[in-house]
Amino acid sequence: MVRVMSDESDELLSVRVAELYYDENKTQDEIGALLGISRWKAGRLLTQARDSGIVRIEIVHPRARRLGLERELQARFALTDAVIVPDPESEADSTTRVAQAAADYLAGLRPVPRVLGVSWGRTLNEVADALPDGWATGVTVVQINGGVSLNRRPGGAATMAATIAQRGGGQAVLLPSPAILERIETKRAIEADRTVADVLAQAAAASAYLYSAGVADASSVLVESGYLTPDDVTELVRKGAVGDVVGRYIDADGNIADPGLDERTVGLGLSELRSAATAIFVVAGSSKHDVARAVVTSGLCTVLVSDESTARTLLEDR
Amino acid sequence: MVRVMSDESDELLSVRVAELYYDENKTQDEIGALLGISRWKAGRLLTQARDSGIVRIEIVHPRARRLGLERELQARFALTDAVIVPDPESEADSTTRVAQAAADYLAGLRPVPRVLGVSWGRTLNEVADALPDGWATGVTVVQINGGVSLNRRPGGAATMAATIAQRGGGQAVLLPSPAILERIETKRAIEADRTVADVLAQAAAASAYLYSAGVADASSVLVESGYLTPDDVTELVRKGAVGDVVGRYIDADGNIADPGLDERTVGLGLSELRSAATAIFVVAGSSKHDVARAVVTSGLCTVLVSDESTARTLLEDR
DNA sequence: CCCGATGATGCTCATATGAGCACGGCAGCC
DNA sequence: GGCTGCCGTGCTCATATGAGCATCATCGGG
């Protein structure tokens, strides 16, 4: 009767088929009989309905992941792994979910790391809290950047490392040094000190690293802790800094933003991080999109744990 | 290791399985191998994920229907059929969707009605517009309540009936009478007139009816058309009226709200409607929830076409 | 008017899935 | 300590589904 019904009528049929299949869970055969079409046509309409987005299948769970994005990211940035959690509807607390995911990933990591190098920060605190007891057996947790002395708040760097170690049935090795020193001579001297040098050596030999990143603005933990003044940060931004990784400020290409400052920063170098077999980078929130891009594109990490919006931003052609 | 993992860990596994199955579309077998569980366990976790609402399957289409609600409504109110469309996200234009659905239903109705009795109103105008050409062959469309003379706007009662008839390859029979008369004697006289009596007789013999309902407030078409004053309506509400059906005001139990007024109303009686084999009631929008309830519970219709929120309201225990 | 290309349809067959069942471990109870 | 009933597990088998292929109608170009 009507000729070109492939547009309108076929779509309507698709809807009908999809309803019967998913809402009523009839079999494709029954649907065929019911609508007077063959089983195969019903099946094809169903695929069509799924492809065209008429049928939307969503996995709703705080710990759900976005596997599609993960694959794309792995391919695009040559990562060993990527873990992407859906954005929460109630914005902002995506850090918690990402931290949870990072904890899950760490707990499931095989082989279980013997020595784990960690940085510190708000995000990592949450990761530590989310780690289950017994996530590893006899792990040594080594701090890879300084800052231990300036922990004012509870749940600071030391506590965090201790938590991770304790739940992994091992011990924490703290880096007894400020993050950034005022004079380069002091930095050289402290690095030469046995207690510091030993820790740095252990850090360099870690079997895996876990770290996050900070944004280059006044809200940074480095500013809050008094290592840098807001003016210092402004100057860094002028030099191209987008954020910091293990205490070191990098520009959009992943290079050191201010070599002078970097010389005064105690901790693992970025090159060690780049050559690591396993470097897990945890980052959440839209303010960190720029640092995240810098880290991921410059090969600082092998594993990315983040949220959906960050992932999408990374995948956009820039 | 951990004992009671059925809560937490099983749910997480479910999520993982669901992701692999729906996002990655792996087979249950593959998933089993991947997660180190048996194919059957994977399958069971999947069912669990679906049941517990972790997996949400939604059919997104303007013409989609809510088959679950439809079944419940049919069972609860002994309807021959119910058609429920999803609520639109962008509130308010649910009338259009419902009208579309009603048109679809009418077009698919078997046996094709020979004589269709219709009321009029905003909703029915939309239904008429949504009807496809050739929805029937040689149908006679009869108006079942008066009002033809007072159509100011285009797309009024007459046009609507004509549209339905034309697209169904038949003719319209209009009821040449006001909806409500001022004196009961006039009403008796006009009903006795051959031209009116004939139409009413045809209306009573219709093989199917299609009608909507109005709310008992000042926005009613009957007020707009000048048959009633806002004060009349206030008085009706005082008497328990919740809305009107084919021009007759009913209370929450489906009884005539004001017998005096009803005596002066020209058109098919409610008892004829109640005894009809097919009475399709089209209603949309939250303002009509009360009338809808009255109509459905008092058995005025055999088929309900409406929206999701109305359906849910009807199914609530009141 | 005929021919080949294209796309839809319905088939065969291999595979994936779900229902029902038997087994084994575990907790509670005697 | 042994018994019993229950739950979780993995099996068998019937059924549902999807991939690939032959067929057929339709359409545009010689």
Image (cartoon, coloured by chain):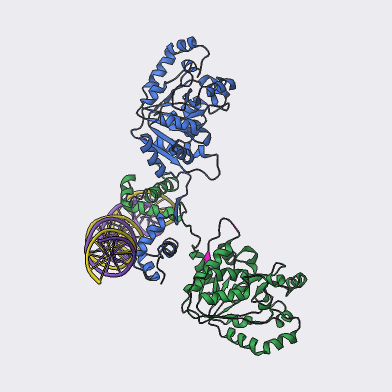
Chain colours: A green, B blue, C purple, D yellow
Residue A236's quadrant in the figure? bottom right
Magenta segment boundaries in residue numbering:
A83-91
Q: Residue at x 50, y 19 (%)?
A: B179
Residue A105 on image: x %, y %: 50, 71
Residue B220 on image: x %, y %: 55, 26
Q: Is residue A142 above or below residue C28?
A: below
Nearer to the camera, C9 or B269:
B269
Residue B297's quadrant in the figure? top left
Residue A21 on image: x %, y %: 37, 50
Residue A253's quadrant in the figure? bottom right
Q: Give the prevailing secondary structure in the magenta stretch.
A: loop
Q: In this view, does B100 lie to the left or right of B223?
A: left
The single residue placed furthest to the right in the displayed view is: A231
Residue B108 can be seen, yes or no? no
Q: Which residue is drawn at 34% across and 35% down?
A: B110
Residue B34 on image: x %, y %: 39, 70
Is residue A308 magenta-colored?
A: no
Q: Is residue A30 left or right of residue B61?
A: left
Q: Is residue A235 left or right of residue A113?
A: right
Nearer to the camera, C4 or A14:
A14
Quadrant assignment for the C terminus of chain B:
top left
Q: Residue at x 57, y 23 (%)?
A: B234
Residue B49 can be seen, yes or no? yes
Q: Which residue is drawn at 49% across and 25% down?
A: B244
Is residue A85 magenta-colored?
A: yes
Quadrant assignment for the N terminus of chain B:
bottom left
Q: In this view, does B26 lie above or below A17?
A: below
